Amino acid sequence: MQPIYVTKPYLPPLDEFVRLLEQVWESRILTNNGPFHQQLEGRLQDVFDSPHVSLTNNGMLALTTAINAAQLEGEVITTPYSFVATTHALALEGLTPVFVDIRPSDLNIDPDLIEAAITERTSAIVAVHVYGNPCAVAQIEDIAARHNLKVIYDAAHAFGVRYQGRSLLSYGDFGALSFHATKAFNTFEGGAVVSREAEGKRAVDAVRNFGIADEVNIPVVGTNAKMSEINAAFGMVQLEHFEDVRRRRRQIDTRYRERLSAIEGIDLVPIPDGVESNFSYFPIMVRDSFSLSRDALYEALKAEGIYSRRYFYPLLSSLPMYADLPSAAAGRLPQAERAAAQVLCLPIYPDLTDADQQRIVQAVIDHARQ
Ligand SMILES: Cc1ncc(COP(=O)(O)O)c(C=O)c1O
């Protein structure tokens, strides 16, 4: 049996990329805001409904650059239910994460719990659109406005996602994306920051390029988060195929929902109304009423060559460097703990065949209580 992995990066026809590579060989411009970089930033302005897009070389540096540009200090309210990059980005910038529990409906930060966690040291809310499903953006914006907080969305999963007729990236002061190989849109490695204001983009662009303003002025501390011409050229090719990729992912998502929705002990995470998803993950919740625990199902699938992933487990608040924070204390994050113990992401990618998907579905059904 061929192994089936949780994802398989989408690659466009090679000759389309080679044609652009020839132009790079011709120009000898390899990085530093070259022509492909400018073209891709321009094209992504339409995708994200924002004139303020800054490419970066990965999602982690998109996050740290945005956090840095927002000039945060003190405490930042965030979710424990995410990939480790979210909390590490705060810690690397010298900030104290304050974990707030998630809501079970979409596994995003629970907006009703945010205000109780705000202190005079709080400078921002860093929330995650988990699996590309929108956070409670209106409520979060309202809280942030009343308490004078910045809002940064970790939108690593949200490429191409639209909510209430707008790109999900058009919400918040900053949104940070990942174009990692495993994401719905990949540039091998890559990312972007979307800023609400022109001033925000200026700050991001400076931090992304060592803090340099011009040949003789370096007014701020910065890093190197620039995207190369190779990655940007690849992004231009990928963009041509994105809607087809989304369509193929949607078909797989629909089939999973049809075939798995009636299994005792398996709950699906719904895509909320008003959302045009990118279908980049297919999380299932393995409840106590299922015949196997989540971990036992994970192992059983693995034994059959099906490699699902426990996104997100372990919970970030349980990691050694965060576990002693007051907000990480036992019993404070019950919904996040439950989700981390029950979630399993099934394989989903554009090239997943119907036969392979049926193999996955059948394996889950075979382990369900008869
Ligand atoms: C929620 C989340 N944030 C941040 C990242 C970091 O992105 P990158 O791998 O591009 O650095 C990822 C994925 O890797 C992610 O899933």
Image (cartoon, rainbow, N blue to C red):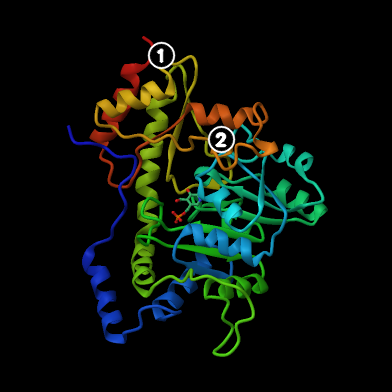
User: Please, what is the three-letter code of the amino acid marked with disc 1?
Assistant: Ser
User: Please, what is the three-letter code of the amino acid marked with disc 2?
Assistant: Ser
Residue beneath the point at 44% across and 25% down: 261
Along the line of sight, the residue nearer the viewer: 214 or 130: 214
Task: Decide: is 91 above or below 35.
Answer: above
Please state if 260 lies on the left or on the right of 101 as rendered.
left
Task: Decide: is 286 above or below 54.
Answer: above
The residue to which callout 2 is attached is: 318
Label 2 neighbour load within 10 Å: few <14, some 14-19, many 20+: some
The residue to which callout 1 is attached is: 291
For the residues carrying marks 2 and 1, which lies nearer the camera in this image? 2
Please state if 307 lies on the left or on the right of 57 as rendered.
left
Q: Measuring from the top left, give residue 20's x and y in whole percent.
A: 29, 75
Q: Measuring from the top left, give residue 149's x and y in whole percent.
A: 75, 55
In the picture, the quarter occupied by the N terminus is: top left
Label 1 neighbour load within 10 Å: few <14, some 14-19, many 20+: some
